[in-house]
Image (cartoon, helix red, strand yellow):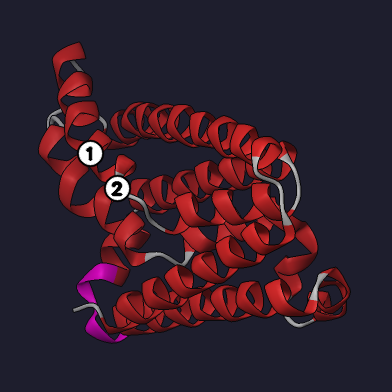
Amino acid sequence: MQWHQVLGFMAAVTPLTLIPGTSFTLVTQRVMAGSRSDGVLVTFGSACGLLVHATLAAVGLSALVMSSAQALTVVKLLGGIYLVWLGVTTWRSARQGIETKERARWRVPWVRLGGFGQGLWSNVLNPKAASVYLTLIPQFLTPSRPIAPQIATLAVAHVAIVLVWLLFWTSVVAAAHTAIDTPWFRRGLSRLAGTVLVSLGVRTAMAR
């Protein structure tokens, strides 16, 4: 793989990364509700979710899922339901506090992983994240060379962009959290984050 192919992919995927989405919202909510370390966990969880998609693409499983309307529908529904669940619990936590959040930990297995698990599964169950490795990456591959190493190289570049952006945003939110850490602001932001997550979940589930 030539360096200009990697740079071209990075130029194409960067605008997609900067658009506020699930990971962006989760980082914001987790830092405001907890600490900077919570945002870091979400960030690395999101990055690992991308690596899952890269791995599936490398072995051909993502192509199988995306080529099947029924399988894609299942992925969309699972991702949408998960995002809606995150949004609802985020909204409720703003009103009911940490105690309710602790009682809700048993509801889905990966909630016990905290911020890392939320970041991981929000990307694993996101068909748009998978589509990056099925519609964008193929444009930068050389068919005459082994595909898996090329996908790995581009995935590393993608993860690097995501890490830089989300870690930067984590620092910004943490600084704002220190400056304006008031109960009404935390409740308002949690409710906003919950609303965004629910809307993202509905859009993901209904996307065609």
Residue at the (60%, 56%) spot, across then down: 29
SS label for mark 1: helix
Is 98 one of the magenta-colored residues?
no
The residue identified by callout 2 is: 19
The residue identified by callout 1 is: 15
Which amino acid, mark 1? Pro
Per the model, the C-alpha gap separating discs 2 and 1 is 6 Å
| Image marks 2 and 1: residues in contact by CB distance under 8 Å | yes
Which amino acid, mark 2? Ile
In the rendered structure, which segment of residues is drawn in magenta? Answer: 66-70
Assess disc 2: are there few (<14), some (14-19) or many (≥20) residues with their C-alpha within 10 Å of its C-alpha.
Answer: few
Between residues 91 and 183, which one lies in front from this camera angle? 183
146 on left or right of 180 = left
SS label for mark 2: loop
Is 67 one of the magenta-colored residues?
yes
Q: Quadrant of residue 66?
A: bottom left
Q: Which mark is residue 66?
A: none
Assess disc 1: are there few (<14), some (14-19) or many (≥20) residues with their C-alpha within 10 Å of its C-alpha.
Answer: few
